Image: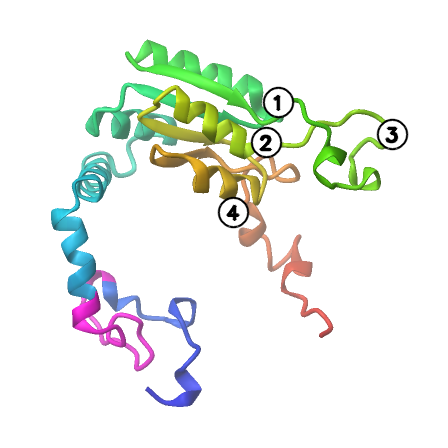
Amino acid sequence: MGNENKHLSCSDCGVLNCYRRDKSFPEFCLTTNTSEKEIDKINELYRKDELVSKLSCAAAYIEGTYYGKLTRVEEIIAFAKKIGAKRIGIATCIGLMNEAKIFAKILKAKGLEGYSVICKVGSIDKTEVGVEDELKIQKGCHESLCNPILQAKLLNKEKTDLNVIVGLCVGHDSLFIKYSKAPVTTLITKDRVLGHNPAAALYTSGFYYKRLLQEEDK
């Protein structure tokens, strides 16, 4: 691979031959530029690692059986049952507590047990961990920090089988995933501007959200 192609990645590809193999791989393709030894090593995980095998096979089952038929809520329920998960942790944003309550009711109706932990658990003021008061949404009063680590720790104590993110902030979701012992999936991805539909910014980047494609000064 030439130096000019060295930093190209999948978003630069126009053929997507890795899916059906009915075209030709571009010179910079990550598939053909990854050694067979490395790919085989990953394949061994799918074949022999108990957890990896269980999750990947369950995900493939859901996709192959219900493609385009189930909502995300229903897919999560089907996935949970396929992997034998009974106790479902719900890591929710305070702004989506109502949605979390509805989801918990749905889980119960489907024979699963939901256990939710809100992001403000611990009720620790942001200034106690070094956040300046001027960075609070409402300054000069108690404003609890989002506490994804405590959310994860409490769900770990409950020995949940699968944890579901309901609208955690960007970055807070990263911390929750890092500290969660159970596998994690997402029901709602927060986007306060677009009604929690972040893909809308991509769809409208050629018109309403042109600013997204404006280059910033270096």
Q: Quadrant of the N terminus?
A: bottom left
Which residue is rendered at x = 73% and y = 28% of the image?
A: 125
Which residue is rendered at x = 64% and y = 57% of the image?
A: 207
Helix, strand or loop under label 4: helix
The reply to whether dot 2 and dot 4 touch (C-beta < 8 Å) is no
**What is the CA distance from the residue labelled 2 to the residue labelled 3?**
20 Å
Helix, strand or loop under label 1: loop
Q: Label 1 sits on what residue type? A: Gly
Which residue is rendered at x = 59% and y = 52% of the image?
A: 204
Residue at far left of view: 47
- The image position of residue 7, as x and y in percent, is 44, 78
Q: Label 2 sits on what residue type? A: Asn
Q: Is 88 on the left or on the right of 64, as rendered?
A: right
**Residue identifier under label 1:** 122
**Residue identifier under label 4:** 199
**Residue identifier under label 3:** 140
Q: Quadrant of the C terminus?
A: bottom right
Q: Nearer the viewer, mark 4 or mark 3?
A: 3
Q: Main secondary structure of the magenta part?
A: loop
Q: Earlier in the sequence, mark 4 or mark 3?
A: 3
Q: Label 3 sits on what residue type? A: Gly
Q: Foreground residue, 196 or 54? A: 54
Question: Badge 4, how many Cα within 10 Å: few under 14, some, many 20+?
Answer: few
- The image position of residue 179, as x and y in percent, is 45, 38
- The image position of residue 69, as x and y in percent, is 28, 32
Q: Nearer the viewer, mark 1 or mark 3?
A: 1
Q: Earlier in the sequence, mark 2 or mark 4?
A: 2
Q: Which residues are magenta?
A: 19-38
Residue 12 falls in image quadrant: bottom left
